[in-house]
Image: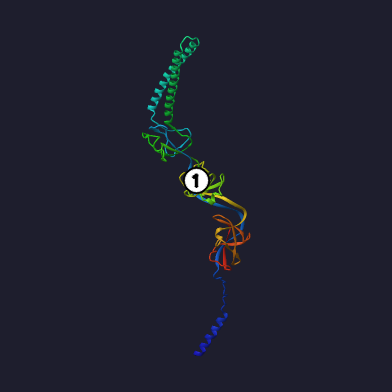
Amino acid sequence: MIVKGSAVLFIAFILFSCSAPKKKEQVKEEVFGATQVKVIKVARQRISEKISYTGTLEAWVKINITPDVGGKIAKIYVDEGDRVTKGQLLAELDTESMRLQLKQAEAGLAVAEANSKDASRNKERMDRLIKENAVSEQQYEKVKLGFEAAQAQLEQAQAAVNLARHALDVSIMKAPFSGVIASKNASVGDVINPMMGSFSPVSGVLTLMDFSKVKINIDVSQNDVLRINKGQPAQLKVSSYPDREFSGIVSIVNQTADPTTKKFGVQVVVANRDLTLRPGTFGEVTFEVLSHEDALVLPQRAIIENKYVFLAKGNKVQKKEVTLGLQNTNLVEILNGVQEGDLVVIEGNYGLIDGSDIKILEEVTK
């Protein structure tokens, strides 16, 4: 019975094995050790070599508003940040004593004018009499000297009036140009002396700036100053507007170096009509010193050891030595070693050797 049962099970197993469908084995071909890379096609475009320097933005014109005479500040009509126009009244001193001095000088002038007229009439009369020999030379000389003294007194009185008027005029402070009040350096009631504090950057009553244009002074190396010329365009970038460039022009190129730093001063002027740029902030000035049109270019990150690139050839790379031309922070000109349309590895190229297996993830366009 046991033998018979075993035979039945064996036959059933054979039948089941024959009737069950076989699964297809899908074989995946995998390449082990291939480096994943990104490539770019060698293309022609314009490339320029640039040099950059950092400097501080300054107002085109800056002046401390200070009266020519000393006195007590009576009124200040503006505040910090106010925009003012040329000729606008900004501040004034207490002028009461000056007005009294002017009245006194004008009275003295009136007396001098009367004396001058009297002396002039006496001289005219004496001129006639001397021709008729009706007076002596001594009498004539005395009248003539009196006339000359009266004229001198008249000039002296007129100068006193002019001086008093000038003191009154300069005690009233007006804007010499349109601009912005940068700082308020004194208060009403303060006594100001224009002869003191002249070396302070905030001396005077107010500081007025015109920064409708700004200037940036930079110190340039001996090699770079030879590549910068007066009138040359320049570009300014500031951190507060990282995506914006401001166009400027070189206004000054010093021909002698600073004896301490051994560098050359260069000044760039940038238009700032909307007052976007603020004096006292830092900016980066860039000069385009050389450019080539229709050059073969690659991104800087494609270059290995400053002389090699890896060309993508199917699923392998070929190491090529290249000669570099113009360079800037982003691009480099290739003089020989590659041709237009070649695919060059720009990401994943470090660690590759000639003939390495690669897998291209993406063809970058820029």
- Asked whether 356 or 293 is in front, the reply is 293
Badge 1: how crowded within 10 Å, few (<14), some, or many (20+)?
Answer: some
> x and y percent of residue 300 in the render?
55, 58
Write the residue at 55% across / 85% down. 11
Please indicate, yes or no, whether residue 323 appears anywhere in the rendered image. yes
Q: Is residue 152 left or right of residue 361?
A: left
Q: Residue 81 appears in which quarter of the rendering?
A: top left
The colour scheme used to paint the residues is: rainbow
Q: Is residue 76 above or below residue 34?
A: above
Q: Residue 356 appears in which quarter of the rendering?
A: bottom right
Image quadrant for the C terminus? bottom right
Write the residue at 49% across / 46% down. 217
Under mark 1, the amino acid is Asn
> x and y percent of residue 1 in the render?
50, 90
Mark 1 secondary-structure assignment: strand
Q: Is residue 52 above or below residue 348?
A: above
> x and y percent of residue 54 in the render?
49, 49
The residue pinned by badge 1 equals 217
Write the residue at 51% across / 90% down. 3
Q: Is residue 108 left or right of residue 229?
A: left
